[in-house]
Image: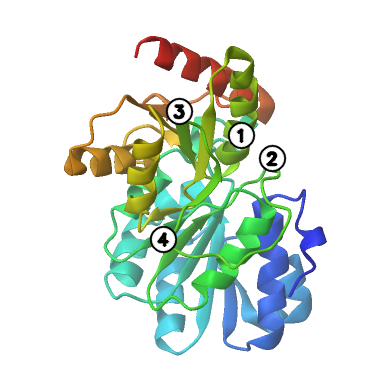
Amino acid sequence: MIDTEKLIGISSRDAFGLTLADLAQNDPRIVALTADLAASVRLADMIKIAPERVFNFGIAEQDMMGAAAGLALSGKIPFVTTFAVFASLRAAEQARTDIAYNSLPVRICASHGGFGLAVGGATHHALEDIAIYRNMPGMTVIVPADGVEASAAVRAVMDLPGPSYIRLSRPTEPTVYTTYEPFAIGKARRVTTGKDLTFIAYGGSVGYSLNAAELLKADGIHAGVVDMATIKPLDIDAVLEAAKNSSAIMTVEEHNIIGGLGTAVAEVLAEAGVAIPFKRHGIYDHFTTAAPYPELLALYKMDANGIAGTAREFLKKH
């Protein structure tokens, strides 16, 4: 096991690289596949430990998915790595048909999720990936909040009998967890409670929502935060509990508001017949621009100030 101190304050992609190498030391079945992005997806430690178990396919993500399916059928434990935009768009058909359709235990670990590639612009921002992967039957979809949770999530998918998609971040997320706990797939974590509003978020948005909740205290608004790191299977009980214990719900995600966490939570509330003020906050169905990451967070109101301001406007209407 990795010392938890090494996981605090690093990005989820960095935590993934450390954890994969740690697992590979003790399990010769683990193989890593990359599409000419070994450094960016943090495979350097894995290459040092077992270079013969790291396969570079060049810019051929579709071939990489097919090869991962074959490796899984041969008894290997494949971890597929690339940028989230390529894993979800360029190689979607192969992930669906070669991997998900055959219920193969391939771990797709995609870095640079959301608009983490920042100055790369809309072509390299992944704001549709959650919607795409949660629509694949049998696919587990996870977005950890920080480096500590990312390490736990990577260990957790080792035991999954079917496919999984883990979205990782290039920028370092705000620290949410300072102690290591085993990751429970399909179970949300209530980080804080609040009677006026509950933020339900994943990834770096969990930390930014926590910061937003602190800002809202100055207005006398008590906001809680639920870390919905597993988007599929969604923790339905956690959603209904949030609706029961607070007066409003707002989802927060670095993703198009269509098809992602906001849609998943709305489906739960609608099917349960729960009448509660509800808002989806994220990218409002448009292509993003190119800029440094902090500027994008501010522009799209995904930083603490933006989330808090959006929450204030939402609550005023209700």
Can you give x and y, in whole percent of width and height, for residue 310 in the image?
48, 17
Mark nearest the camera among 1 and 2 is 1
Pointer 1: what residue?
210
Q: Is residue 16 above or below residue 216?
A: below
Proximity of marks 2 and 3: CB atoms separated by less than 8 Å: no
Mark nearest the camera among 4 and 3 is 3
Marks 4 and 3, the one that precedes in the sequence:
4
- Residue drawn at (68%, 63%) of the image: 180
Q: Secondary structure at mark 1?
A: helix
Pointer 3: what residue?
197
Quarter occupied by the C terminus: top left
Marks 4 and 2, the one that precedes in the sequence:
2
Give the distance between the C-alpha atoms of the residues marked 4 and 2, in whole angstroms.
Answer: 22 Å
Q: Is residue 212 above or below residue 1?
A: above
Marks 1 and 2, the one that precedes in the sequence:
2
Proximity of marks 1 and 3: CB atoms separated by less than 8 Å: no
Can you give x and y, in whole percent of width and height, for residue 171 in the image?
68, 41
Label drawn at residue 186: 4
Pointer 2: what residue?
174
Specify the amino acid type for callout 3.
Leu
- Give the image quarter of residue 82: bottom right
Mark nearest the camera among 2 and 3 is 3
Q: Secondary structure at mark 2?
A: loop
